[in-house]
Amino acid sequence: MIDSSRFQRLALWFAGSAALSAALLWLAVRGLELTLVCQIATTARWDCLVLAALLGTLSLWLRASRWQLLLHQLHIRDFASIYWATSVAAFANLCVPRTGDIVRTVRMSAVNPAASPYIVATVVAEKLADVLGLLSLAVTAAITAPEESRWLMGIRTPLLVLGAICATLLVAGATLSHWTARVFTNLPIGPRLRALVLDSLRQLSEGLGALHQLRRASAFLALSVLMWCVELGGVIATAAAVGISAPTAAACLFIAGLGFGSLLPTAPLQIGLYQLVAISALTPFGTDRPSALAFSLVAQATTLAVVAVWGTLGLAFRGIKGSRP
């Protein structure tokens, strides 16, 4: 049974998430004629939506391929198992924001608990790389934004500073783990605890340093660039489905806004966040608010369909073949 204090904390968290999503949704839909929005959304072109769904599937495949590069020490022979874990994580992340990385870490660690620190480190390294990718998209949008959106130029410096911090952590993370291991070696602790800590730090160092090998880093970068291009294509295809000719800068701004906005404790399916980000990203480029809101609904439904199908299938495929790093 869940104790009353934990239940109260969960209830407060869900209530706060629902309230935040409701506020974001209200900001997005206020003053709009919802019948017009529904009309635009229900007449979306299916060929564009099918293309967007295929690109979404390809994006999941590319994400799984990147993670396989980072998990090289586990010698996982079955790529499908990594793809299923990635798909389940994407589904979980959409249903309960920010849980996807926990789900895939637990799923992979359940097969090899001794490698948990290494798996966690690869997830951290991938997240840092994703932040760099999102920052690149945001800066691209800021540079190419129209005059009425020049406020984006003002955030370039904070974005570049954040990017420098993430890049430093990627480069120096393994070195920091080595330094921490040397400190623990000299501490007056029991041999069993020391061995456990040192083994965990070794795995953390290997996971964070997975991109320090030039060939692996080049492959990871190529897959990342291709993945972001595919996701941009998916946004543009979805926009075309509702009659919007979205420029690349608008798609960059939408993906970056949705990525950074996912840090907010919103309700399941990111209700409210999708709508406000879509309107904020598309209207500066000449899209009217009803069409932007219709785009958000169609994009949300398409994303849900893709991750629900592959995530549900992923729950049925649990086998992960590999060995301890």
Image: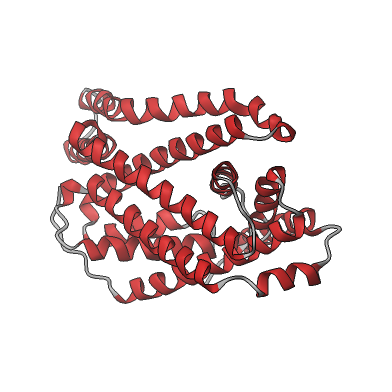
- Residue at coordinates 50% horizontally, 53% vertically from top-left? 98
Q: Is residue 51 left or right of residue 125?
A: right
Left or right: 53 as drawn, with respect to 318: right
Q: How is the image coloured?
A: secondary structure
Q: Residue at x 57, y 41 (%)?
A: 249
Q: Residue at x 42, y 74 (%)?
A: 309
Q: How many marks?
A: 0
Task: Choose between 44 and 201: the one closer to the eye.
Answer: 44
Q: In this orientation, which residue lies closer to the viewer: 206 or 27?
A: 27
Q: Position of residue 47 (x, y in %)?
A: 50, 71
Query: Can residue 79 be seen at all in this image of the molecule?
Result: yes
Residue 191 versus residue 220: which sits nearer the camera? 220
Task: Give the vertical position of 246 relative to 177 (above or below).
Answer: below
Residue 185 screen position, x and y as percent:
20, 26
Report the side of 63 relative to 132 (left or right). left
Could you say where residue 253 lies in the image, as x and y percent from the top left? 59, 43
Q: Residue furthest right?
A: 31
207 over 66 or under it: above or below: above
| 231 displayed left or right of 257 | left
Image height check: is 66 above or below 142?
Answer: below
Instruction: In the rendered view, tell whether residue 146 sits above or below residue 186.
Output: below
Specify the quadrant of the image occupied by residue 179: top left
